[in-house]
Image: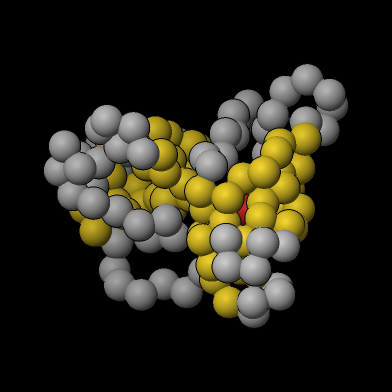
């Protein structure tokens, strides 16, 4: 299954120096095969609290988000609502739940959701 993976600039990641989840900024993306950025690529993020850099593979990023503590039952997706990275939502059309793995700050803002069967989908929020 071909899944494109394009992390956004800002992600909340566990910083091993701060020993907590902190807002991190993407420093650079290193393509595994020298051409395309995908889940197997390496992404260098720096922590905005301590400014130390850490490397994550796309798979690591997804794993880390998957194992993040779940707080509430998934909300039903609607483009009018505001969502957080790491939150699980349920999508009526796909008939399944998905995990928000990243977001961007466009107009409207979009969230990148990893669905169990449908794969990665970009959805709008805050309309
Ligand atoms: Zn840190």
Residue 107, horizontal then vertical, whole percent: 27, 30
**Residue 112 drawn above or below residue 46:** above
Identified at 68% across, 32% down, the residue is: 38
Of residue 106 and residue 51, the one placed in the foreground of this image is 51
Rendered residue at 23%/47% (across/down): 77
Q: Is residue 95 something one can see in this rendering?
A: yes
Q: Identify which residue, 112 or 23, lies in the foreground.
A: 23
In this picture, residue 44 sits left or right of residue 8:
right
Quadrant location of residue 88? bottom left
Residue at position x 36%, y 52% from top? 97
What residue is rendered at 64% in x and 77% in y? 18
| For residue 19, above or below residue 108 | below
Colour scheme: secondary structure
| Number of dots carrying numbers | 0
Looking at the image, which residue sits at the far top?
35
Q: Is residue 24 left or right of residue 43?
A: left
Residue 92 visible? The answer is: no
Q: Position of residue 53 (x, y in %)?
A: 73, 57
* Viewer-proximal residue among 38 and 117: 38
Considering only vertical position in the picture, is 96 above or below 66?
above
In-front residue for pair 88/46: 46
Rendered location of residue 8, percent (x, y)? 52, 40
Horizontal side, residue 45 vs residue 12: left or right = right
Q: Of all residues shown, which one is farthest toward the bottom?
A: 19
Quarter of the image with the N terminus in it: top right
Which quarter shows the C terminus? Answer: top left
Q: Is residue 112 left or right of residue 12?
A: left
Q: Give coordinates of residue 17: x percent, y percent.
A: 71, 75
Quarter of the image holding residue 111? top left
């Amino acid at each position: 299954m071909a899944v494109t993976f394009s992390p956004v600039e800002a992600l909340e990641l566990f910083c091993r120096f701060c020993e907590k989840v902190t807002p991190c900024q993407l420093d650079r993306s290193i393509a595994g095969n020298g051409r395309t950025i995908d889940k197997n690529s390496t992404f260098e993020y720096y922590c905005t609290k301590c400014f130390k850099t850490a490397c994550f593979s796309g798979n690591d990023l997804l794993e880390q988000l998957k194992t993040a503590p779940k707080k509430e039952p998934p909300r039903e997706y609607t483009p009018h609502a505001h969502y957080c990275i790491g939150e699980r939502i349920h999508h009526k059309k796909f008939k399944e739940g998905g995990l928000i793995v990243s977001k961007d700050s466009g107009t409207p803002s979009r969230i990148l959701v990893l669905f169990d069967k449908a794969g990665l989908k970009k959805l709008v929020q805050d309309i």
